Image (cartoon, rainbow, N blue to C red):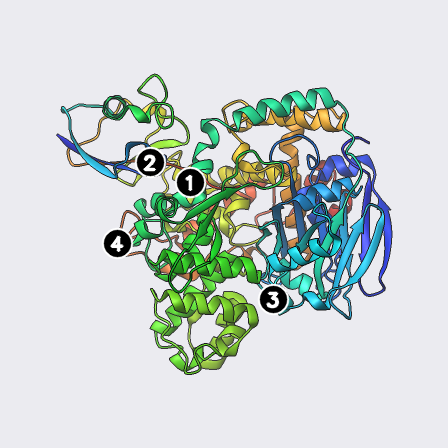
């Protein structure tokens, strides 16, 4: 088999034993890699109903088909487990040299079972696995952990993924960090922490054998050239942070916990402002010629020295959505999340929920007591120092508030409701427990559907249904019969990229057109040159449907029902008062209609369940046996 | 008539301006506006506007009154007096 080793490595942290599983070529053709393969490994290795933070919830890592090859932006891996935030599938992606090392070590995937009694750094060197004491790494930040491990090995070809203090403290929005990039969402870091897995380090010394190296090199070179042109210019110069002003102009920028869609100080927290005043450099993921990551650096003042990796999603969550107009405080908050190992999006949205609770009198100053502020602090919107401090409190579960917010908006609001008989769930902004992204969905009706039915919850990247709304391909303010097919189409389109995985920013660099017709034939050529298979347009298209289906199947097995496909209360009942998006909500009637036409488009039942025949046609007969109807 | 043009993202970087008011003839189309901008700000050619001087370079787009993005098929429609035109570069994901 070309492009793959055919081997999955199982590591049991409880027994400290390993075993090798071989998979047939047909399995690889069905699940490919990235989020699809990682989710399939979850399906095979997770007992339904398990506690996400128990030893029964394995960490499933799947490499990328193009990792270790010349294919641009192919240096990514997928990681999945049962999410401690949602209780459903939690899949994350990261660009990382770890993906390349994993491939060179000869593994297509890794499944980490059980839990260690002591903190451990699992070191993989080709086919050897070593369990190294990690007690001296406990408490270190993500960067400190990576650097310490690199120094210990004296080899910068040892690539590590690590967790920070947040993961150690089982914070449900903790992430996994590598080379400054993150497997960010769904709380993977907490799952690592529950296993006392502080780091996974890999040194791979083997090559990657592909079917047609000459063709692959030629195709890769052409993509590389295109990636230096106008198709990726925005990412290279400003990164995703330029979306702050775009969203603000359209009245879609989450502001003060999604109470507004226009932030009066948006210019001060914009990508343009960052570029002019704080940009230190740009960095790239493994195998990436684009280098979109903008690094912001604070040079003076109380946050001097802070360096944060600034993405739009991090920026909206920790600035406008917390009412913060101080870019330096935002950079410091993001830097804290990066170093302490927190997902910036869930952290920012959870903090904004707490700020609203404070402003509405649910919380008092005393609820915010911590070592830095023994009397507590005023937690109003706009208080940048409060947001900075709360990122630290959450990561360390410090004080009442740090411990509460470490649970995320779903659990925190439920706890406060029990303690104080309030209705804070009305402003707990999550879908299925995963905090919502930086696009207000009240006037993005296709996106609202994509989010509601999203298998990992409140995620923009997996649905991509904002695209037709924001680009004006449909009327974003209204609902019509096309949206079910659109939501299906966009989520499966995204799933193709997330499965190979390739960064979506390359999507126009194949032929100049980002649609399926423009990209799928070129992607098929890449797959075929790597594997020797004969994929065509239809086969590439199926990658996305299969990836989405295995995740949905996992959720069904965990007890998903139609009622779980819901939106935050605020988006359904509370229109914004000002701006271009004022006056709209997603009504119950609209949402239920959208779900109906989406399930129909997917070929599912009206209850959102998957017919056996549908699963069989996708080559998932064993899944059909378990959850098919 | 007068239209208000706002520059975001790369268009702001290459023009060095945030916003301007343009006095144009009644019936001026969105395509005419792009032509006008390419003449007024030649630096937009290449990065924001294609070499033909009348077509926007992806991912740049014209947003009309913050409510809709003008599609290629709508470029020969006309804005009204007092309208806002926002030049933005739209994209997300990764």
Marker count (numbered): 4
Comparing A267 with A302, the one in front is A302
Secondary structure state at the residue bearing disc 3: helix
In the rendered image, which quarter is residue A275 located in? top left
Residue B81 visible? The answer is yes
Query: Any mark on residue A238, and which?
Result: 1
In the rendered image, which quarter is residue A162 located in? bottom right
Label 1–label 3 contact, CB within 8 A: no
Comparing A254 with A317, the one in front is A317
Residue density around tag 1, few if under 14, some if 14–19, many if 20 or more, within 10 Å: many
CA gap between label 2 and label 4 equals 29 Å
Label 4–label 3 contact, CB within 8 A: no
CA gap between label 1 and label 2 equals 10 Å
Q: Which residue is mark 4?
A: A578
Q: Earlier in the sequence, mark 4 or mark 1?
A: 1
Q: Position of residue A244 (x, y in %)?
A: 37, 47
Label 3–label 2 contact, CB within 8 A: no
Q: Which residue is mark 3?
A: A165
Residue in view at x 82 percent, y 31 percent? A1
Q: Is residue A61 above or below residue A365?
A: above
**Callout 1 and callout 3 share a chain:** yes
CA gap between label 1 and label 3 equals 31 Å
Q: Which residue is mark 2?
A: B13
Say which chain tag 1 marks: A
Q: Position of residue A60 (x, y in %)?
A: 72, 52
Comparing A370 with A52, the one in front is A370
Say which chain tag 3 marks: A
CA gap between label 3 and label 2 equals 39 Å
Residue in view at x 79 percent, y 40 percent? A205
Label 1–label 2 contact, CB within 8 A: yes
Q: Is residue A72 above or below residue A154?
A: above
Residue in view at x 45 percent, y 32 percent? A233
């Amino acid at each position: 088999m070309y492009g793959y080793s055919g081997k999955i490595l199982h590591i049991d942290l409880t027994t400290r034993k390993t075993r090798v599983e071989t998979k047939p070529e047909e399995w690889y053709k069905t699940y490919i890699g990235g989020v699809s393969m990682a989710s399939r490994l979850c399906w095979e290795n997770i007992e339904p109903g398990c506690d996400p933070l128990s030893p029964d919830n394995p960490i499933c890592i799947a490499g990328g088909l193009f990792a270790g090859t010349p294919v641009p932006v192919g240096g990514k891996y997928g990681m999945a487990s049962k999410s401690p935030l949602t209780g459903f599938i939690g899949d994350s992606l990261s660009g990382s040299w770890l993906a390349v090392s994993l491939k060179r070590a000869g593994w297509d995937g890794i499944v980490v079972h059980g839990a260690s009694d002591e903190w451990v750094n699992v070191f993989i060197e080709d086919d050897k696995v070593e369990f190294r004491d990690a007690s001296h790494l406990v408490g270190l930040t993500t960067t400190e952990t990576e650097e310490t491990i690199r120094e210990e090995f004296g080899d910068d070809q040892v690539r590590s993924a690590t967790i920070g203090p947040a993961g150690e403290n089982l914070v449900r929005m903790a992430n996994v960090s590598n080379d400054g990039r993150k497997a960010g969402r769904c709380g993977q870091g907490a799952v690592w922490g529950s296993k006392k897995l502080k780091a996974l380090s890999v040194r791979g010394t083997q090559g990657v054998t592909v079917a047609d190296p000459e063709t692959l090199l030629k195709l890769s070179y052409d993509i590389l050239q295109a990636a230096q042109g106008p198709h990726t210019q925005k990412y290279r110069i400003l990164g995703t942070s330029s979306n702050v002003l775009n969203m603000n102009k359209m009245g879609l920028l989450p502001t003060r916990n999604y109470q507004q869609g226009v932030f009066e100080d948006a210019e001060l927290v914009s990508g343009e402002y960052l570029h002019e005043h704080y940009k230190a450099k740009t960095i790239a993921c493994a195998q990436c010629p684009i280098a979109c990551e903008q690094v912001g650096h604070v040079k003076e003042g109380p946050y001097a020295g802070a360096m944060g990796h600034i993405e739009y999603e991090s920026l909206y969550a920790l600035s406008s959505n917390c009412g913060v107009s101080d870019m330096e405080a935002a950079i410091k908050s993001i830097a804290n999340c990066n170093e302490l190992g927190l997902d910036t999006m869930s952290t920012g949205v959870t903090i904004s929920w707490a700020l609203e609770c404070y402003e509405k009198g649910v919380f008092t100053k005393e609820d915010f007591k911590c070592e830095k502020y023994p009397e507590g602090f005023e937690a109003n919107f706009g208080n940048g120092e409060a947001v900075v401090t709360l990122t630290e409190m959450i990561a360390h579960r410090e004080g009442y508030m740090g411990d509460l917010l470490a649970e995320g908006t779903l659990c925190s609001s439920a706890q406060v409701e029990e303690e104080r008989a309030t209705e804070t769930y009305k402003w707990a902004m999550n879908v299925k427990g995963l905090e919502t992204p930086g696009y207000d969905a009240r006037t993005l009706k296709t996106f609202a559907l994509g989010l509601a039915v999203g298998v990992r919850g409140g995620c923009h990247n997996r649905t991509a249904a904002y695209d037709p709304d924001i680009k004006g391909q449909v009327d974003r303010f209204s609902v019509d019969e096309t949206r079910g097919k659109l939501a299906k189409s966009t989520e499966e389109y995204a799933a193709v990229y997330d499965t190979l995985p390739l960064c979506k920013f390359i999507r126009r660099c194949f032929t100049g057109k980002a649609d399926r017709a423009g990209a799928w034939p070129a992607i098929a050529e890449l797959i075929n040159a790597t594997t020797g298979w004969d994929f065509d347009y239809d086969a590439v298209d199926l990658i996305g449907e299969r990836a989405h289906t295995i995740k949905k199947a996992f959720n069904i097995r965990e007890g998903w029902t139609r009622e779980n496909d819901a939106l935050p209360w605020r988006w359904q009942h509370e229109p914004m008062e000002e701006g271009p998006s004022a006056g709209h909500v997603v009504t119950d009637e609209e949402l239920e209609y959208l779900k109906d036409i989406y399930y129909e488009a997917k070929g599912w039942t009206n209850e959102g369940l998957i017919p056996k025949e549908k699963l069989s046609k996708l080559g998932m007969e064993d899944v059909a046996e378990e959850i098919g109807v | 008539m007068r239209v208000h043009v706002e520059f975001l993202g790369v268009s702001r970087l290459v023009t060095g301006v945030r916003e301007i008011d343009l006095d144009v003839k009644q019936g001026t189309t969105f395509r005419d506006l792009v032509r006008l901008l390419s003449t007024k700000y030649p630096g937009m050619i290449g990065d924001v506007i294609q070499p033909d001087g009348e077509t926007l370079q992806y991912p740049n787009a014209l947003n009309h009154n913050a409510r809709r993005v003008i599609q290629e098929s709508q470029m020969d429609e006309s804005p009204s007096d007092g309208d806002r035109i926002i030049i933005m570069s739209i994209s997300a994901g990764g």
